[in-house]
Image (cartoon, rainbow, N blue to C red):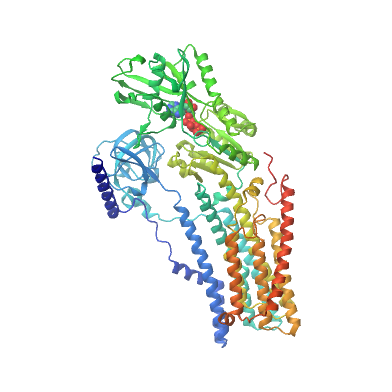
Amino acid sequence: MRDDDDAEAEEEFTFSTQLRKVRGYNEFAASEPPSALSKLIDQLKEPLILLLLGSAVVSLLLGEVGDAVSIVLAVAIVVAVAHIQEQRSSESLAALSKLVPHYCHLVRDGVTSHVLANELVPGDIVTFSTGDRVPADVRIIESVQLETDESPLTGEIKPRRKTTDALGPSTSISERDNTAFMGTLVKSGSGRGVVVATGPQTEFGAIFAMVDEVVEQRTPLQLSMDDLAKKLSMASFAIIGVICLLGLWQRRGALEMFTIGVSLAVAAIPEGLPIVVTVTLALGVLRMSHRKAIVKRLPSVETLGSISVICSDKTGTLTTNKMTVCELWTLEDGKIDAKELPDSPSPSLARTLLVGNLCNNARRDEKGEYVGQATDVAMASVVRHDARGSFTRTAEMPFSSETKWMSVTGTLTVPPSAANIGQGSTTYTKGAVEAVLERAPHAQTAEIRRAADEMAKRGLRVLACAVGTTFCGLQAVQDPPRQGVRESIAELRRSGIQIIMITGDAEPTANAIARQVGIDGGASMLGSQIDSMSERQLQESIDRVSVFARTTPRHKMSIVRALQSNGHVVAMTGDGVNDAPALKLADIGIALGRGGSDVAKEASDVILVDDNFATILPAVEEGKGIFYNIQNFLAFQLSTAVAALSLITLSTAAGLKLPLNPMQILFINILMDGPPSQSLGVDPVDRAVVMRRRPRRKDAPVLTRRVLMRVLFSATIIVLGTLYIYVAELTDDGFADERDQTMTFTAFVFLDLTSAVQNRGLTTTLTGNRMLTLTVSVSLVSQLLLVYFPPLQGVFKTTSLGLGDLTLLVVIAGLGFAAHEGRRRWERQRADEEDGQDAADGWGGLAVA
Ligand code: ATP
């Protein structure tokens, strides 16, 4: 029998695989990205590169073949490096787009499983319920009050009721009520159906083919980097113009000045800056995904470092969402331990258990375990015998976070004798105690509430059960806090982030769990209190509140708004459809990967793969760390540009022969824009240091005073060291030759690489950033090749240096290194001192938890 099953499963598997081959995957192929070659050609079309190539042509016409070849080769190297980096940037961005896979519920052999939506083929049977995106075009075969939002397809905002009825001859999309369309959203109810079209064959696919234009959004940081690059370009052009005029006035060769001017422009303009920023952000996002936080859009990385309040759901985020009924209570029996249920229960206990059993949507999965809403699973698991087999359900009022109760109506063919229930149609209700007592009032309400409160104060979720309009008892559900949550909360609070719990549960339950996870010290507030307050009143009192209880999703909007108007940068978690507006409104919307609805995921910026609150911590750490890294490579890149410009300006002004030739300047450009710079972007984040800092102000500039000071410091060291060598070489023999230029060039490169190493994170050890060690070593070896390898000597116009020369250069670099060490020590001390007071550069001091 087993073998037959296996063979059948295999056959089916091969059948769907075959079908997939014919029909393709259930996804849309975005238009082909431009090929590597066409991108390369685009890069060659850059104005500066064209100018350089122009100067090569002029050199050629003037008969200076060697110069022409050198310029072309140097341009080739510059373009190749830029090209590789750009490829890397688009590869990491492409990797990002695959981080959020879309799943659906597939039914095979009566068993539901969670599969990737892109694997569906026509003929598959799928189910969907409130909050799901319909995974393909599906002919409905079962519908429970199913309504879908078809606005993406038809523009019609009103949800459309979907039925199983056969249709008349009309085939317009807006009238095909027995089909749920791919990409539309289940607004309410649930349904089941047969996949009739996938991918490009769906109605959505037809539209997608028309609007296949994905506009890439640039982050505020990227924009400010673009802006910075533009300003720097203008400044460089101005300086270069002055240098050229000065040179011409000094009757230097026009072609020489032109070529120097253009290569200086290539070197001084940090055209690689925006790319390095993008790659750094994208790599940060990939690193976060390894730590189970998926950041959907690059701008969110920046905001993560500025979060000052995190509003978190309780159930499933702070707690495990593994619920078990641990106690029951009836007026007749008092408290009963769920592990010691009597064999012959009292009528009210039997009824309480029966309500939990019948008014329940938990189903068994392929492994025979209950799946569904955690509360339902808990209540289904506590009964020994599932009575739903002999229950015919005629109606259901589904549970909603707004009403906080659910009921089912139907007839039982064999009611349990102890429950004393007739054979007619009956309604079974379970839900929040107040909500159920409102529907089933009881003379001993006060006593019932007291019992419920006592259980809630121990952190239990209490549900009341009623048959018809008669209250029968309480079930108390346990949902323990997740491991590691308490520690993460403590850590986040130490870094100045306030944590707020928002829950639909009762106040005592919420307060008890809040205490257990370390959200204490604040007041608690009820959803109904929010309703009775004006916006202004809420704004005034919200900073004192750390727990919101008995809320509905719409309260989340008021909470976010009030916090934001108090100047907070708010992160908010959510899972349900109704959470979507608040997730969108928050500065960072955080959806739950497993328990969250598709809508919540779409509305959010970050997805927690494991639903765990503790995962927010690494995301915040990375978000803060990335900023430091960006500042570090900014300091390095800018100091190189400033040094190159100053060096040429100073020597031109002094009437000296130029210390570097165009090819050498282009090589320096590769160091500045290329690998060493990128490695500074992946400096390991020092969690302890980063988390000691208060959240960054949202509008704080990246280029702070401290970064500018560092740029000046690094550039000064490079210029002083290089000029010293150049002047010493010149005075040596009185005129400038290839040897002098080689010495100056090598001095510049050594000092620049020292600056790269020393601009790493303040607490990163010398070999702590392996990528930096590697790229700096490779750059060093390349420099030695340029100096000693004859073919390259020809291109870069260098000559071999003696051991004494090299030793002198190493000593100079060593001095530069030592000066940087002094600066680093001073900066570290400053940072420590500033912990405790707000720093002027946008990073606050140590947070007082
Ligand atoms: P959190 O916001 O912390 O995640 P929650 O969203 O899980 O909490 P709700 O699901 O809105 O909170 O639950 C609120 C209340 O509704 C619960 O305290 C419980 O009394 C009641 N309740 C929860 N689930 C069910 C259910 N399946 N059937 C009936 N009532 C329920």
Q: Estimate the x, y position of residue 458 in percent, counting from the top left.
A: 55, 25
Residue placed furthest toward the bottom: 63
On the question of residue 696 being in view, the answer is no
Quarter occupied by the N terminus: top left
Q: Is residue 815 above or below residue 789?
A: above
In depth, the one of 612 and 562 nearer the eye is: 612
Q: How many marks?
A: 0
Direction from residue 578 to residue 140 in the image, left or right: left
Image quarter of residue 715: bottom right
| Residue 246 image position (x, y, % from top left) | 70, 78
Image height check: is 37 above or below 685? below
* Residue 431, quarter of the rendered image: top left
**Quadrant in which residue 421 is drawn:** top left
- Viewer-proximal residue among 703 and 107: 107
Q: Nearer the viewer, residue 809 or 311?
A: 809
Q: Is residue 489 above or below residue 640?
A: above
Q: In this view of the protein, which residue sits in the foreground, 841 or 514?
A: 514
| Residue 201 pos. (x, y %) | 31, 51
Split into 4 quadrants, where in the image is the C terminus?
A: top right
Q: Is residue 632 visible?
A: yes
- Looking at the image, the residue that sits furthest to the right is 731
Residue 556 x, y percent position in the rendering? 54, 35
Question: Which residue is pictured at 48% across the width and 60% down the height?
Answer: 90
